[in-house]
Image (cartoon, helix red, strand yellow):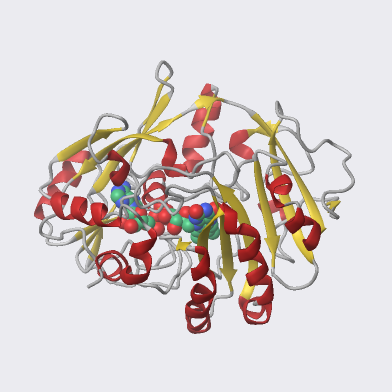
Amino acid sequence: MQERNWAGNLSYQAERIAHPRTVEELQELVAGARTIRALGSRHSFNDIADTSGTLAALDLLDPVITVDAQNMTVTVSGGTRYGTLAAELQRQGFALHNLASLPHISVAGAVATATHGSGDGNGNLATAVAGLELVVADGGILTAHRGETADFDGMVVGLGALGIVSSVTLDIEQAFQVTQHVFEDLDWEQVLENFDDVTSSAYSVSLFTDWSGSTVGQAWLKGRVSDPGVVAGQRDFFGGTPALSARHPLPGVSGSNCTEQLGVPGPWSDRLAHFRMEFTPSKGDELQSEYLVPREHAVDAIRTLRRLSGLLTPLLLVSEIRTIAADRLWLSPNYGRDGIGLHFTWRQDQPAVESVLPLLEAELAPFAARPHWGKLFDGGAAAVGPLYPRFDDFRTLAGRLDPAGKFRNRFLDYAVFGC
Ligand SMILES: Cc1cc2nc3c(=O)[nH]c(=O)nc-3n(C[C@H](O)[C@H](O)[C@H](O)COP(=O)(O)OP(=O)(O)OC[C@H]3O[C@@H](n4cnc5c(N)ncnc54)[C@H](O)[C@@H]3O)c2cc1C
């Protein structure tokens, strides 16, 4: 099968891709399969979604977006993408608390890997999950609710190992307006000396760097208009100056692919992601890795990466630094700790990237760095497991819900089960 992931660095090994149109069809598919995995919008960079058997893509599943204004939740079918959901919520006057850099990803696939945006007070996207409906190994339906279902906190960031999510219920809030300001060439030393002030200066802050030189390339500040923050006309941000036209995080790529900047207020749905739904996000011809580091190690970890610039910069398109609030989801890289994300958008040279990852992980190991589940990393279960207090509980849960290993794949064997 020549089907590939979004970045094109991975050919799925599955025998076939099925596109069930109803939950009943999905149930029959799962019940009859030897091995099966859910396939989201294919934006992961490793083989987390793959299987030797059937891939179930939910893109044709009955589309459902149901708002419950009384309980302030929205329920979406398993194939729904954030961009579709965000537009509909905004149309009805509601919002999600945050978005990732791109709106193209499926809700179920993003939640399964604990995808995140940025913001000191913002948990990752999985923290908004209030309920799940899963098609489990025997084809039956398991419904799970936050605060009610035992082990719910283990089910949300499920890596596709527990079943196929046929619908997700998310917390919503009233729609809000956001402004986005970009500053360029911030002074690294000022940023590191005032790191808490930098990251708390807006609802969502991202720093873009290639680790070389004495300045941070760009800071993207997404502020809720009701909050105090960057004001129109502010000339200095930790040594940086305001960008005078729309910017893209990657040097040389048009800012018109990105959500509106220059402080123009607009709906959360058109500002919280970096990239517009109608355009290719990021570059396309790339690879990605990311490590989540506890907040208290943020400055030391960043200093370490700056020291490694000779190794990193030649392979990089750009790096992004974001902040994420702690949560209680067992396999969330933010479990139990506020933290920062140290993200790498690499040139698409996989052998070279894979040769650097073990060195990078050794350098970040003293900071208890947890890898992003959907991006490239090196360490297996022996390295990753001790970083998660509930790792064994997750393995037990997966064994209980999927005793025959129908949802197991090479990735899970390597990174979670250690076999
Ligand atoms: C350009 C780009 C930008 C990105 N930006 C960010 C970012 O800002 N922040 C961030 O944290 N990550 C980011 N990512 C990573 C991306 O968000 C994650 O890899 C995410 O998991 C991709 O979701 P997907 O729908 O493509 O799922 P896939 O990659 O298709 O699958 C991922 C996992 O989800 C499982 N899955 C999918 N659907 C279901 C379902 N219905 N039920 C059960 N399991 C399911 C799959 O089995 C697999 O294990 C980015 C990726 C790209 C390509």
Q: Nearer the viewer, residue 76 or 125?
A: 125
From the top left corner, tell me how far across and down residue 26 is, in percent: 20, 46
Instruction: Report the residue at 16% width, 45% height from top.
Output: 27
From the top left corner, tell me how far across and down residue 237 is, in percent: 83, 49
Q: Nearer the viewer, residue 419 or 367?
A: 367
Which residue extends farthest top?
70
Instruction: Report the residue at 51% width, 23% height from top.
Output: 92
Above or below 381: residue 324 = above
- Asked which quadrant contains residue 303, the reply is bottom right
The N terminus is located in which quarter?
A: bottom left
Is residue 294 visible to us here? yes
From the top left corner, tell me how far across and down residue 317 is, in percent: 64, 70
Query: In this image, 152 relative to 359: left or right?
Result: left
Is residue 281 visible to us here? no
Count every numbered label the image shows and give the total.
Answer: 0
Query: In this image, 214 relative to 369: left or right?
Result: right
Image region (quadrant) for ligand 1: bottom left
The C terminus is located in which quarter?
A: bottom left
From the top left corner, tell me how far across and down residue 88 is, in percent: 49, 30
Query: In this image, 271 relative to 349: left or right?
Result: right
Above or below 105: residue 285 = below
Query: In this image, 371 relative to 251: left or right?
Result: left
- Asked which quadrant contains residue 151, the reply is top left
